[in-house]
Image: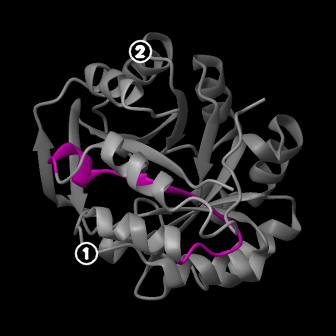
Amino acid sequence: MKIELIPSIDLLQGQVVRLIQGDPRRRIVYATDPVEQALRWAEEGARWLHVVHLDGAFGTEGTRMTWIARLVRETPLMVQLGGGLRTLEDLERAFELGVQRAVVGTMAVRNPAALEAALARFGPDRLVLAVEVREGQLTVAGWREKAGDPIAFAREWAARGVRWALYTNVMRDGTLAGPDLEGAARVARAAGVQVLVSGGIGALSHIEEAGRRAFPGLAGLILGRALHEGYFTLREAIARLRDLEGENHAAAPFPSAG
């Protein structure tokens, strides 16, 4: 089974950015057109694009959903959107724009009834539970508030029907220091969900490590800063991971949205 490599674009106040350890005061701003960048990744082999609407995550004005609509409309990529999706209306708006999959975290903590309704309405394959961890604690509301035990959180929502989780170790996000595969594996093992891992991937060796240490439930890796800053290309990453195919068949695929 293959691990999906998913490039990521973070949007804040109309700019493509990368935050260091989830801190909006520590941001790298890229002079990049989101659509042009996404099209380049599509040419290099991407099927999915992960978009983080940071203005939504932080509850500020800035990036309008116009960019999201353009990424859906003007690229061949399936878009997975996270950030500020906290009500059924938010999810409806995203799906009406053509977003294939939505990432929710704060909703699960503050308005669990709404997420249960969303699971029933949209189905579990269109929703991804955000398990964002800082120093062992689950965080929500743009990584600013602690919300308990991430393992218990993932297990609880798996029991309610969640099938997918996006695991982020916030302290590694944007650092290029390597992903937290151990933390992601604990979530997958405890909850029995398919896990996408975000945060810290900065070298082809990190992708090789994930391929060699693939655990049951590892479905994909989110690639951000390393791609934007040219540490490697998506084409190189896909080729390197393909070289490891056959060595480990534990990972589950990241399926096309239905």
Residue 203: horizontal and vertical position, in percent?
A: 26, 64
The magenta span reads 213-230
**Residue under the image location 15 percent in, 54 percent down:** 27
Residue 205: horizontal and vertical position, in percent?
A: 31, 69
Task: Residue 201: name its quadrant.
Answer: bottom left
Can you say whether 126 is above or below 93 in the image? below
Residue 107: horizontal and vertical position, in percent?
A: 64, 55
Element class at badge 2: helix
Q: Which mark is residue 70?
A: 2
Q: Is residue 227 visible?
A: yes
Residue 38: horizontal and vertical position, in percent?
A: 35, 27
Of residues 112 and 250, the one nearer the viewer is 250
Q: From the image, state whether disc 1 or disc 2 is nearer to you.
A: 1
**Residue under the image location 80 percent in, 55 percent down:** 113
Residue with the most extreme top position: 74
Can you say whether 249 is above or below 83 in the image? below
Of residues 76 and 159, the one nearer the viewer is 76
* Magenta region includes residue 228: yes
The residues tagged by marks 1 and 2 sit, at their Cα atoms, a distance apart of 32 Å
Dot 1 alpha-carbon crowd within 10 angstroms: few under 14, some 14 to 19, many 20 or more = some
The amino acid sitting under disc 1 is Ala
Element class at badge 1: loop
Lower position in the chain sequence, tag 1 or tag 2: 2
Q: Quadrant of the N terminus?
A: bottom right
Can you say whether 74 is above or below 255 in the image? above
Q: Is residue 83 visible?
A: no
Task: Residue 169: name its quadrant.
Answer: bottom left
**Residue under the image location 35 percent in, 31 percent down:** 41
Residue topped by disc 1? 177
The amino acid sitting under disc 2 is Arg
**Residue under the image location 61 percent in, 79 percent down:** 185
